[in-house]
């Protein structure tokens, strides 16, 4: 297991926003290959960048906004944390919750990062999580994560042999509220080269703390997950590569919010800040360079 320094953060969605530098590809579960438009369409195979490894994790999307027939989101009642999609995942199911039960039939999904992690750098790994309306139980640490260099084989069956062997923990703090999104995160020190993230429950029931909750109809601890993130620390020289930077007469538009500097031909920094849209209309006529910090990206441009 890689060295890690646990950081547990659990905040109300209304009071927390996460960095825009997450390197999880489609961490908001929005990018779809297809939408079948029926009850079977909530399968995780809908998603382009996520894979079902174990169990039955379900992608719940409003496909009508992507040019497909509408998926009626039959399982999902909670509003999305962001965008138009999230994932339904079980931490424990009914057969695991009886006396002496110690086998796990749980959901594990696998995503991909934009680029490999750098050795020795500590990253923030987080998810937004909400308890489902149908759940009769809640767990203190319902899900964990692993980060690895190669994709996990499918299927990844290890029922009854999960000993919490994970790289980090998403703490649920025994969530009782079924109407709120919470943010849970852990810090992870990279070994180097990790490109894939696995999210699921790697603990057998006898190693978990669970409690009943009111109002559920299914003997399980199940959750909605949205906005999975892996965030590099600021100031480390680690940023996603710049995919595009488009110059207009009055502005530069970058692919995402970035830290930038604008340097004159004489080598003087004339502007600096953090934005996706960089206003250049106030610059005197001349030759300049825009540099995106921590990426190596430099572009020459001229104002008239």
Image (cartoon, helix red, strand yellow):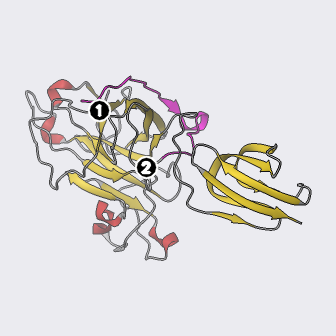
Q: Nearer the viewer, residue 14 or 232?
A: 232
Q: Position of residue 20 (x, y in %)?
A: 57, 46
As drawn, the label of residue 24 is 2
Q: Earlier in the sequence, mark 2 or mark 1?
A: 2
| Helix, strand or loop at mark 1 | loop
Q: Where is residue 32 in the image (x, y as percent from the top left)?
A: 40, 67
Residue 1 position (above or below residue 285): above
> What segment is highlighted magenta in the picture?
1-22
Residue 280 position (above or below residue 136): below
Q: Distance between the residues labelled 2 and 1?
A: 16 Å
Please give the name of the residue rendered at 43% of the width and 76% of the height, measured from the top-left corner. 69
* CA neighbours of label 2 inside 10 A, class few (<14), some (14 to 19), many (20+): many
Please give the name of the residue rendered at 19% of the width and 42% of the height, measured from the top-left corner. 93
From the viewer's perspective, tell me whether residue 106 is left or right of residue 266. Answer: left
Q: Where is residue 56 in the image (x, y as percent from the top left)?
A: 23, 54
Residue 15 position (above or below residue 269): above
Q: Which of 69 and 281 is in front in this view?
A: 281
- Residue 177 seen by the camera: no
Q: In which quarter of the image is the N terminus?
A: top left
| Helix, strand or loop at mark 2 | loop
Q: Mark 1 points at which residue?
A: 167
Q: Residue furthest right?
A: 284
* Magenta span includes 4: yes
- Where, by quadrant of the figure, is residue 222 drawn? top left
């Amino acid at each position: 297991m890689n060295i890690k320094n646990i950081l547990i953060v659990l905040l109300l969605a209304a009071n927390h926003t996460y960095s825009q530098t997450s390197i999880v590809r489609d961490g908001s579960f929005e990018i779809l290959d297809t939408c079948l438009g029926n009850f079977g369409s909530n399968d995780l195979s809908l998603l382009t960048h996520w894979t079902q490894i174990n169990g039955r994790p379900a992608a719940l999307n409003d496909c009508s906004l992507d040019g497909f027939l509408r998926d009626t989101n039959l399982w999902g009642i909670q509003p999305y944390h962001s965008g138009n999609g999230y994932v339904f995942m079980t931490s424990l199911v009914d057969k695991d919750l009886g006396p002496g039960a110690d086998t796990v039939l749980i959901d594990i999904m696998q995503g991909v990062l934009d680029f490999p992690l750098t050795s020795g750098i500590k990253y923030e790994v987080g998810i937004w999580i909400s308890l489902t309306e149908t759940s009769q139980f809640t767990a203190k640490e319902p899900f964990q994560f692993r980060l690895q260099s190669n994709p996990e084989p499918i299927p990844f069956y290890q029922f009854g042999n999960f000993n919490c062997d994970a790289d980090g923990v998403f703490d649920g703090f025994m969530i009782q509220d079924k109407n709120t999104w919470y943010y849970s995160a852990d810090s992870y020190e990279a070994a180097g080269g990790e490109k894939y993230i696995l999210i699921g429950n790697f603990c057998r029931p006898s190693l978990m703390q669970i409690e009943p909750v009111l109002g559920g109809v299914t003997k399980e601890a199940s959750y909605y997950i949205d906005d999975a993130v892996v965030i590099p620390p600021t100031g480390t020289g680690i940023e996603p590569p710049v995919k595009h930077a488009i110059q207009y007469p009055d502005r530069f538009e970058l692919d995402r919010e970035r830290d930038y500097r604008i340097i004159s031909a004489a080598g003087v920094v004339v502007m600096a800040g953090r934005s996706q849209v960089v206003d250049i209309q106030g610059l005197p006529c001349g030759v300049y360079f825009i540099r995106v910090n921590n990426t190596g990206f430099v572009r020459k441009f001229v104002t008239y």
